[in-house]
Image: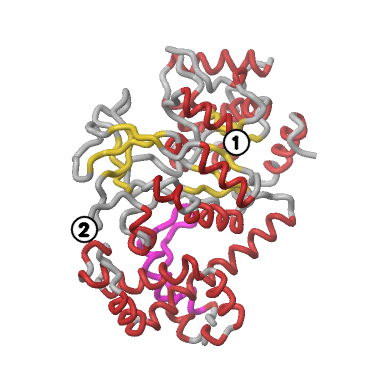
């Protein structure tokens, strides 16, 4: 469909190590449209099978994206009233008018899934499992909210009555205002959580293990009045609790899940995680606050847990270690020396933390590549509540050098995490 020259003619940005999203966005659509124009994709039997198999989400998504483009990228809440409300005659009209654009968005999804499944097959055949993340909430401006408003806490005009976030705490005097629409959990229960079951089932097609974000929101969620400028006037409301996971296990089996149970946890949240049997998360960087006791120190872990040196929302371990105060740094050095029964390695600071994670009793240990490479804050993936400089770092070919794989294998074998 495309030549090497077609791809090289596009400007993808000047850095291998950092993504230039603006240039990628512009070039991506230009090259995809060129590929689409010569594809005759509608005649492809594999494509036809893909569209049929994924009709439960793809039809609404492709229509939503095509209509959004026709309105200059505006949110569906700003579309003409008839299509905003999904009047049948309006839906039929746009399907006919935009059928080529709809096909283009179906084509994109087909390409992605085809390529992704090849990658997953290769990974699985080489003993690698893929962990995928599923956020608890969706965006207000999304195909889900436009196509299925009955799933969400919307008023008669189709606008949210409340939105998601977190209450004020020691880190934020006004709390966190995420702005995502909230679910009508009573309706979801009436439908046997059908939308959730479909959503999670599809995840297991793409991934081997699913990490469910903001797990505490299934026990209780924070409801902030829509339109409030801060999260200060929100209130806690009951979520579906164990009932959702009971139904999920009945419908799709006891699949591997990681419960993202970070932050302030109430006894009922702890009980929910325990009842599901899902492993919770332990973040090593959270352990070394010299002012107070911590549940994240490795000696407190249980086997049914997943330990990370840090996640995508943390700085790299080297960046973090360089930024903490002297007392916390000294505490970390002393603790790790005792835990590992070895002198703290000042030359290879990060490997002390990597070894502590691997030496812990947690059944699973996750080490970000940036930590294996010993990189600093320049390789941080995401800084929560900021825009413009996130999800840009990427590993460059050859960056691991010749000895890293052997070093990783040796330490993993030492702690019986590799054959």
Q: Identify the secondary structure beneath mark 2.
A: loop
Q: How many marks?
A: 2
Report the front residue among 235 and 180: 235
Q: Identify the secondary structure beneath mark 1.
A: loop
Report the front residue among 258 and 33: 258
Above or below: residue 416 compared with residue 153? above
Q: Using the image, tell me which numbered label, if any, was put on residue 278.
A: 1
Residue beneath the point at 56% across and 58% down: 202
Above or below: residue 283 compared with residue 120? above
Mark 1 or 2: the one toward you = 2
Report the front residue among 115 and 75: 75
Above or below: residue 48 compared with residue 55? below
Q: At which x and y percent is residue 171?
A: 32, 27
> From which residue to which does the magenta span run?
5-32
C-alpha gap between disc 1 and disc 2: 39 Å
Q: At which x and y percent is residue 184?
A: 36, 48
Residue beneath the point at 35% across and 35% down: 237
Q: Is residue 214 visible?
A: no
**Image quadrant occupied by the C terminus:** top right
Q: Using the image, tell me which numbered label, if any, was put on residue 157.
A: 2
């Amino acid at each position: 469909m495309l030549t090497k020259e077609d791809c090289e003619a596009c400007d993808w940005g000047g850095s291998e190590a950092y993504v230039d999203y603006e240039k990628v966005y512009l070039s991506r659509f230009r090259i995809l449209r060129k590929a689409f124009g010569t594809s005759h994709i509608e005649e492809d039997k594999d494509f036809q099978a893909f569209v049929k198999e994924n009709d439960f989400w793809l039809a609404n998504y492709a229509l939503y994206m095509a209509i959004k483009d026709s309105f200059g990228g505006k949110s569906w809440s700003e579309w003409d009233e008839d299509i905003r409300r999904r009047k049948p005659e309006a839906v039929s009209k746009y399907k006919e008018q935009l059928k080529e654009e709809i096909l283009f968005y179906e084509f994109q999804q087909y390409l992605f899934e085809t390529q992704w499944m090849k990658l997953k097959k290769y990974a699985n055949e080489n003993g690698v499992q893929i962990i995928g993340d599923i956020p608890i909430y969706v965006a207000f401006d999304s195909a889900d909210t436009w196509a299925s408003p009955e799933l969400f806490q919307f008023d008669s005009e189709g606008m949210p009555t409340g939105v998601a976030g977190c209450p004020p705490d020691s880190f934020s005097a006004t709390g966190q205002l995420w702005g995502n629409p909230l679910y009508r959990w009573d309706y979801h229960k009436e439908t046997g959580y059908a939308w959730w079951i479909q959503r999670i089932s599809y995840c297991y097609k793409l991934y081997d293990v699913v990490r469910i974000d903001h797990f505490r929101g299934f026990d209780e969620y924070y409801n902030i009045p829509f339109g409030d400028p801060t999260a200060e006037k929100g209130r806690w409301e009951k979520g579906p609790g164990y009932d959702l996971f009971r139904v999920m296990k009945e419908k799709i089996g006891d699949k591997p899940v990681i419960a993202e149970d970070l932050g302030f946890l109430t006894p009922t949240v702890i009980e929910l995680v325990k009842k599901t049997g899902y492993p919770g998360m332990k973040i090593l960087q959270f352990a070394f606050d010299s002012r107070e006791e911590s549940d994240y120190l490795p000696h407190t872990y249980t086997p049914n847990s997943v330990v990370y040196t840090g996640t995508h929302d943390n700085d790299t371990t080297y960046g973090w270690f360089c930024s903490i105060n002297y007392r916390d740094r000294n505490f970390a050095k002393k603790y790790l020396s005792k835990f590992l029964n070895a002198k703290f390695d000042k030359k290879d600071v990060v490997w002390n933390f990597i070894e502590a994670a691997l030496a812990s009793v947690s059944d699973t240990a996750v080490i970000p590549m940036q930590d294996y490479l010993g990189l600093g804050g320049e390789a941080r993936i995401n800084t929560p509540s900021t825009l413009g400089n996130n999800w840009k770092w990427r590993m460059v070919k050859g960056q691991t050098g010749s000895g890293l794989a052997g070093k990783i294998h040796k330490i993993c074998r030492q702690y019986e995490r590799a054959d």
